[in-house]
Image (cartoon, rainbow, N blue to C red):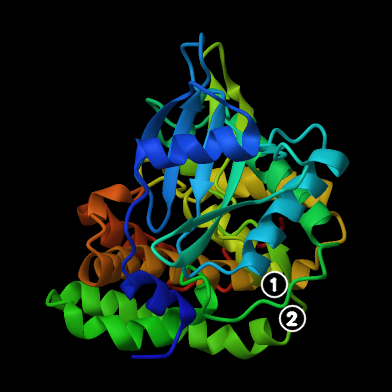
Amino acid sequence: MHDFDGYRTLGQPHEPVDEREAGALLVRDYGLDGARLTRIATERDDTFAVTVQGERSPRYLLKIEHPAEDYGTVRMRARALRMLERRAVNVPVTRLVPCSDDGMIARYDAGGRTRWATLTTFVPGRIVSSLPGRPSPALLAGIGDRLARIQRVLADERGYADRLGRILWDVRLLPAIAQDVLPMIDDATARRAIEQAAATYESVAGHIDALPQQLCHGDFHPGNITVRDDRPDEIAGIIDFGDMHMMPAVCDLGTALCYLVDDVLADPLEPCRIALAAYLNVNPDFDRGLLPLLMPVMQARAALVVLLPLLAERRSGTSPEHYLFRPESRIVRLRLLQSLSDGASDSFAGA
């Protein structure tokens, strides 16, 4: 196995924080007494929806980070949310709530270990991935538009020294992760598809590695976007900045587009093209010469969607059902992307 920080985090056990302990932190660091906390299942931290006394719906989200998450990383995320709040006021991202002393981060000590916590606003609306039917063209355009606007702001966050392998969802890790996890997969068809995705990515890896990096959301997909019940075409909120990391912007873009492919349509890539057009409208300086990299990146992400839930289950006990796609649909999506790439020199030509 490779020596990635993300592997160590998955394999490092920690005692869950219960609602009573989390409530005490809210009282001490945020002055919130009498709040009702509801645990939310996550991959590696302790997260709670916080409903303040006298209200019915959650107002805040409390996240107590995994013990392996260092202060610098938590501070980077907090700084990024502050930047987005100040410089992208029309992009409805979750907002950071300051501590009682106006600090961005709270400290939680238990069992001889220090963990870091943040409180953010609870984003209203329905998760796009849970909506019936498929996203409308207006919503798809909104997804591309908001991704570009977030990237433009985060590009100015230059004070964080990231480490490749800290976030396992980084598509650049696919060849290494495939090498480590493929022995756990018995299905020959799935193995071939993942090997093909890794080979396809490796064919463009040199080009991608030479590109400048910037801070990116890293997990921008319909499971992290909400809409209002009365306005299903309009983005109400953008959540889960926990996988932010440094990478080329084209990797962040390809990651987002991977989740928009629709196998029911005559052209399964049509939703991707709508989102891409909106993205390019906001980011006209994006190098169109990088568009041929999108399909290899999308396939790499789809392969990670197959591999990482299995790895998480083996190393930390996380249920595969926690993830956005059902287990049986993950390999189907990867094979669809590969079939769309066969014989196509550039699936997004003319964008």
- For label 1, the residue is 248
- For label 2, the residue is 211
Placement of 276 over or under 51, stated as above or below: below
Placement of 101 over or under 216, stated as above or below: above
Q: In which quarter of the image is residue 155?
A: bottom right
Q: How far across and down, in percent of the image, does residue 70 sit? A: 58, 69
Rendered residue at 55%/35% (across/down): 26
Residue at the far left in the pictured view: 186
Residues 185 and 166: in front is 166
Q: What element carries label 1?
A: loop
Q: Which label sits on residue 115?
A: none
Rendered residue at 19%/74% (across/down): 189
- What is the number of callouts on the image? 2
User: Amino acid type of disc 2?
Assistant: Leu
Q: Quadrant of residue 45?
A: bottom left
Q: How far across and down, in percent of the image, does residue 20 sit? A: 38, 36
Query: Dividing the image into 4 quarters, which one contains the N terminus?
Result: bottom left
Tell me: 288 left or right of 332. right
Tell me: 264 left or right of 22. left
User: Amino acid type of disc 1?
Assistant: Pro
